[in-house]
Image (cartoon, rainbow, N blue to C red):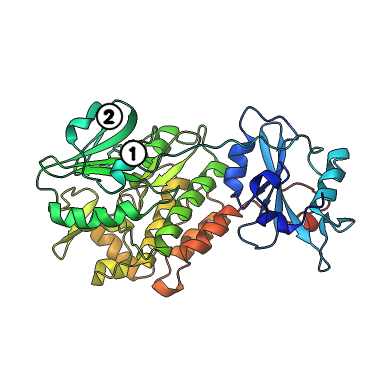
Amino acid sequence: MTVDPMTVDRPDDRRPLWFFGAIKRTDAEKQLLYPENQTGAFLIRESESQKGDFALSVLDEKVVKHYRIRRLDEGGFFLTQRRTFASLNEFVDYYTKTSNGLCVQLGKPCVKIQVPVPFDLSYKTVDQWEIDRNSVQLLKRLGSGQFGEVWEGLWNNTTSVAVKTLKPGSMDPNDFLREAQIMKSLRHPKLIQLYAVCTLEDPIYIITELMRHGSLQEYLQNDAGTKIHLTQQVDMAAQVASGMAYLESQNYIHRDLAARNVLVGEHNIYKVADFGLARVFKVDNEDIYESKHETKLPVKWTAPEAIRANKFSIKSDVWSFGILLYEIITYGKMPYSGMTGAQVIQMLGQNYRLPQPPNCPPQFYNIMWECWNAEPKERPTFEKLHWKLEDYFETDFSFADTDNFVR
Ligand code: AMP
């Protein structure tokens, strides 16, 4: 069987086992790191950033390496121009017989593992998302946030969920219901899925998927650099950018993007939470949310034009993403520590920006810097940020012939 890019259009059961289609680099890593795979396990995927290009991901001991497969104008494939192939099949055949510059000889195709995510509690909640609060058992308090408490709960004695119980008066139920309608329709693997609500009495319950490791801010602070290093930090940032790129495509604005609003699940899954809620909450946490012209804002995360003129847009979310990158690379440090919100506003007006933290690679700092362009239009899109972070470690094999692998 000759495999060519048309593989993409084949039904799954007719694709070679090693062809995983358009999956992300980070998802390829996750699949290859499952214990079912051994050194040499590999897959070929379509590159997300360079449409029509392919990438090879290979497991070498406990590390996954990625190679960009280049295309010849006349249709062949190569890692290095010294050895070209008419089809991906020939390419795989060759590298299963010799490593010839690859980190290891290719072994077995990566085992495909599907991790199902329940998008709704049951078919009934698809439309009837107001559920009976008696069907939810609150088991363990996970935290208390500015608007109430968060509990681990069990729905219908079967499904683990997170339940946010809101302080009475923290929002107008009608405003919330309007926002929740939209939130429920936003579905993406990197966004916390809203499952259901109980709004008929106080306290209002917001029922979402449960994330075992809590907020990214605490997760980073607890680790403080012991287990988490640049590879994971870039992965976190890429996952958040992917969720935000989806919001961008839906013309939805988060308004409160920060490490405290990103949640951490098992197997290094990171998801954006609390999108849109900032608009409906009556905020009263003075540490982070400072008063400015009657509204209260997380000043250190908020873009200057949003502070000055209430101009919230996806570009003000991009500014906040830059601050979130700062939090990620500093293991959850408070940005502009020692400065008040008012001082920050004044300094930003004089073109001051957060300095490059120690141990922050220039490549990472450049991305932050771009997010803080004074001109909102000049800031990158989340789509671009996503690709940049996905490709952060990817190197062209053909340009690195002497040093054959990418990281
Ligand atoms: P919040 O009210 O959103 O600031 O949440 C308070 C704390 O509860 C967070 O810092 C998390 O540790 C925890 N938490 C919030 N949502 C979830 C969730 N969906 N799954 C697990 N823990 C959560």
Residue 339, percent across and down? 29, 54
Q: What type is the residue that disc 1 sits on?
A: Ser
Q: Quadrant of residue 400?
A: bottom right
Residue 232, percent across and down? 54, 42
Count the marks: 2
Q: Closer to the N terminus: mark 2 or mark 1?
A: 1
Any part of residue 198 in sight: yes
CB under 8 Å between callouts 2 and 1?
yes
Q: Is residue 139 above or below residue 378?
A: above
Residue name at image x 47 percent, y 55 percent: 241
Q: Which type of secondary structure does the marked residue at label 2 adopt? A: loop
Q: Which type of secondary structure does the marked residue at label 1 adopt? A: loop
Give the class, few, some or many, for how many residues have Cα within 10 Å of label 1's Cα (few <14, many ≥20): few
Nearer the observer, 360 or 50: 50
Residue matched to label 1: 122
Residue name at image x 47 percent, y 40 percent: 269
Q: Say the numbered circle drawn on residue 156.
A: 2
Q: What type is the residue that disc 2 sits on?
A: Asn
Any part of residue 66 in sight: no
Residue 154, percent across and down? 29, 28
Q: Is residue 382 left or right of residue 21?
A: left
Image quadrant of ligand 1?
Answer: top left
